[in-house]
Image (tube, helix red, strand yellow):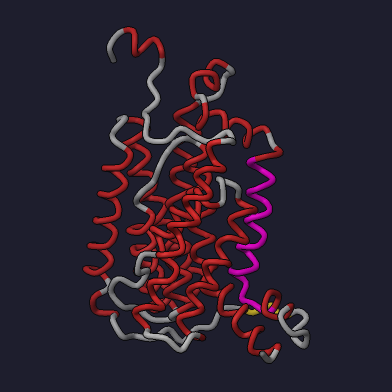
Amino acid sequence: MDLWVITLFVALAIRMGTPLLLACLGEIYSERAGVLNLGIEGTMMLGAAIGFIAAYETQSLLFGFLSAMAVGGLLGLIHGVVVVDLRGNQMISGLAITFVGMGLSSLIAHSYVGRVLNVDAPQIRVFEDVPIISAIFCQNVVVYLAYILSIVMWFIVFHTRIGIEIRAVGENPIVAEASGVNVEKIRLICTVLSGAFAGLGGAYISLIDMRSWTDLLTVGKGWVALALVIVSLWNPLFALFISYFFGALYAFQVFLGIDINLAKMIPYAATIPVLAVASKLARRLGIPVLGKPYIREEEALHGV
C-alpha cells in the first residue's frame, strides 16, 4: 500500500479520535475522584449544538469552543450538585443529563440543520513532506491541544499533590478527608471538568470534523468515550493512544469497501473484547470506587 494512503488514513484516525480523547480525559478525572458521569453523550451533543450555533453566528471558532465548554461545564455542575451535594444516584443523574442534552440540542439547533460553517481551524504543519509522521504533526491546533493535555493531565494525576488527592478521594474518601482533603470540593471540580471536556469534544465534531449540524451528531461517541476511560485504566497517557486506535476503527468507515452500516458497527463491537481485557487488568490496580455518595462518619452516626 502506498505510504501516502497510509498517511491519509492515520490523519483521518487522529481527526476522528480527538473528540473521544477530549471527552475521555475529562471523565478520567471525574472517575478518579469517584464520580461516574453517564451524561457524557448528552453533554457532547449539547456542546456540539451550542458550539456550532455560537461559531456560526459570530464566525469565531474560539467563541464556539468556549461556549461549548461553558455549557458542558454547567451540565457537569448540575450533575455534581445532584450527586455530591445532594448525594443522588450517579447513574440516574447522568442518564438524565444525557436525555436533557440530547433533547435540548435538537430543540435549539433545529433551524441550523444543513448549514455549513465556513471558518477553518488554524493548522500547524510540521514534517509535512514525511509520510505517516506528517499525519501526526500536520493537524489543527485542537489536536495539538489534545496531545498536550494528555501529557499534562497524566503528569498532574500521577506526579503532583493535587493528583494524589484526586486519586485518594476516589479510592478512599474517608482516609482522604482525615488527611485534610476537601472531598466534596475535589469531586465537584472534577465533575465540572468532565462536563467541560465533553462539551469541547462535542464542539470538535461539529466545528472541525463535520463543520455542520445534524440531529444526533455525536452518534454514540460519548458512550464510547465512557468505555475508553476503563480501557485506558484511568490513565490520560494511555487514553491518548487508545482513543486514536478507536479513531482508526471509525476511519475504516471511509477506507473499507464494505456496507456502511457494518462499518459503523466496528468501533462499538470492538469495545466489548477490549473492555473485557481491561476490566481484568483494572482489578489488579488501585481503581476508583464509583457510584457511592460520600457520607461523613459523624453524619452516618446521626443518620444524616
Q: Residue lying at the far bottom in this picture: please name it.
A: 2
Q: Residue at x 50, y 32 (%)?
A: 170
Q: Nearer the viewer, residue 226 or 182?
A: 226
Q: Nearer the viewer, residue 260 or 131?
A: 260
**Position of residue 266 measured from the top left corner of the image (x, y, whole percent):** 43, 71
Q: Residue at x 33, y 44 (%)?
A: 78
Residue 141: say if magenta: yes
Residue 120: say if magenta: no
Q: Nearer the viewer, residue 157 or 258?
A: 258
**Position of residue 178 measured from the top left corner of the image (x, y, whole percent):** 54, 15
Q: Is residue 155 above or below residue 302?
A: below
User: Which residue range is magenta in the image?
Assistant: 138-157
**Position of residue 293 measured from the top left corner of the image (x, y, whole percent):** 36, 28
Q: Is residue 253 above or below residue 92?
A: below
Can residue 32 be seen in the rendering of this structure?
yes
Q: Quadrant of residue 110?
A: bottom left
Q: Main secondary structure of the magenta part?
A: helix
Describe residue 93's horizontal placement relative to residue 275 as left or right: left
Task: State the quadrant of the C terminus.
Answer: top left
Q: Residue at x 46, y 35 (%)?
A: 34
**Position of residue 273 measured from the top left corner of the image (x, y, whole percent):** 47, 57
Q: Quadrant of residue 45?
A: bottom left
Describe residue 242's horizontal placement relative to residue 78 as left or right: right
* Callout count: 0
Q: Residue at x 63, y 34 (%)?
A: 162
